Amino acid sequence: MIKLVISIILCSIILVECNSIEILLIGSTGIGKSTLVNNLMSQNVAFVNHDDTGTTSVDMYNVTAYGFDFKLYDSPGLYDGNNDDKSIMKMIIDKKAMLNIILVCYDISQPRINSNDIKLKQDIVDNFGSDILNYVLVVYTKTNLLKEDEIYKRIETRHNRMNWTNTPWAYAYNEDHQSYWVRDLWFKMLDVSKKHGLSVFDIYKAGMNMLKLKVLNNPTPTPVVVPHYYYESTTRNRKDCIGIESIVYLLKDDEVIKTSLDNIQLGDFIKTDGGYSEVYFIYKHKQLGQLLRIRTFNDNIKVSNNHLVPVIRDEEEQLLKAKDIKIGDKLKTQFLGKSYWSDVTKIESYYGLSEYILTHDGTIIVDDITVSCYVSYWDKYLTCFLGILYELNPDYVNQNNLLIRIFKNIYEYIGPIC
């Protein structure tokens, strides 16, 4: 049954861009898909039956969350003899779904993995190849039935044993236990959507009905490798800046252009957390400095240890130095011109050229991630006169200007003290 259902779902997709992020929930009967829909929408819209099959049709719900528009498709339980295959497929076709994500749901409260759990993934892979898993987010429901210290251990074990190791996952409570899990699930769905640029599945008929996906590859620049002896001679001075190859959004002649930070000039308007703001100071380092590459699901930023970055930690938004950021913290990232928060997945150290840049707004969108223009808690006050100087005479705000070089020496001395 599952093979036929998924074939009809994906072959009914129209290859056009969609305005909403469209999500299908699938899984066995009784695992809590309809309850999950209700929690995601913060209202009881999906019928929940605790004694028998609940959903008997493919129900679609419109919801706006964190500024993004979604369509949720709640499907009847799979591997249930009470459901008629043909009627399910007809209902899916009638919905004309243009799916971006498939939420594959499992009941994590069950003590053992059953045959249907294994069958669910295997049927998907057998029909369409392993590439389809790039569009899957595994959701483990009913975590409220487990002890807090048991949740992650069981999910990790279950995830690996069912061979979902390289597929992202999230967990869900079947009650309003702690609301932050709802927010985190939305954010992970946005991560999966952004990974593929909201492109829908591309279907080719070559012999058999096989599904192939176009995955956007964003290669990460190779870190600059320098001998160990060179580190000492190039890191004596403070280089609290952003990697010059970082991508920013430049507003020029009413057109938004993506370009590297190295191409930005004084007076340019670049995207910040509050819109587009004028650049009033640039300092380009000529020597290599130590930088951190902090990765999220889709993006990464390359900043110095002391550069300030907005994060969410312990459910609180904070401004932390890059060196204090940990895996699991959330960074503010961009998708479809809007902001959401994505988990830090990896942190690496490397050496490269960097650049210091100030805007009137005080923030800057770098490689789609929001970072502060300032590199210490006192930096805003130590550098405020640069903005005044730029308004008086932009020609003075040049890193080769004697006044700026004097200020730089003072700043490097006072900065560590502050």
Image (cartoon, rainbow, N blue to C red):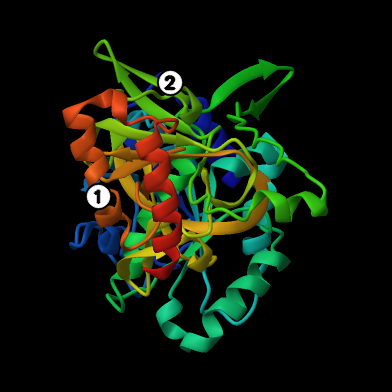
Seen at 60% across and 58% down, the residue is 347
Give whichever of 138, 190 is nearer the camera. 190
Say if 31 sits above or below 334 in the image. Answer: below
Query: At which x and y percent is residue 107?
Result: 50, 70
Q: CA distance from mark 2 to mark 1?
A: 26 Å
Sequence-earlier tag: 2 or 1: 2
Give whichever of 307, 407 is nearer the camera. 407
Query: At which x and y percent is residue 229?
Result: 81, 53
Instruction: Name the disc covering residue 129, or none.
Output: none
Give whichever of 170, 218 is nearer the camera. 218
Name the amino acid, label 1. Tyr
Query: At which x and y percent is residue 205?
Result: 65, 17
Residue 223 in the figure: left or right of residue 6: right
Instruction: Name the disc covering residue 14, or none.
Output: 2
Name the amino acid, label 2. Ile
Residue 121 in the figure: left or right of residue 344: right
User: Circle 1 is placed at which residue position?
Assistant: 66
| Secondary structure state at the residue bearing disc 1 | loop
Q: Quadrant of residue 210?
A: top right
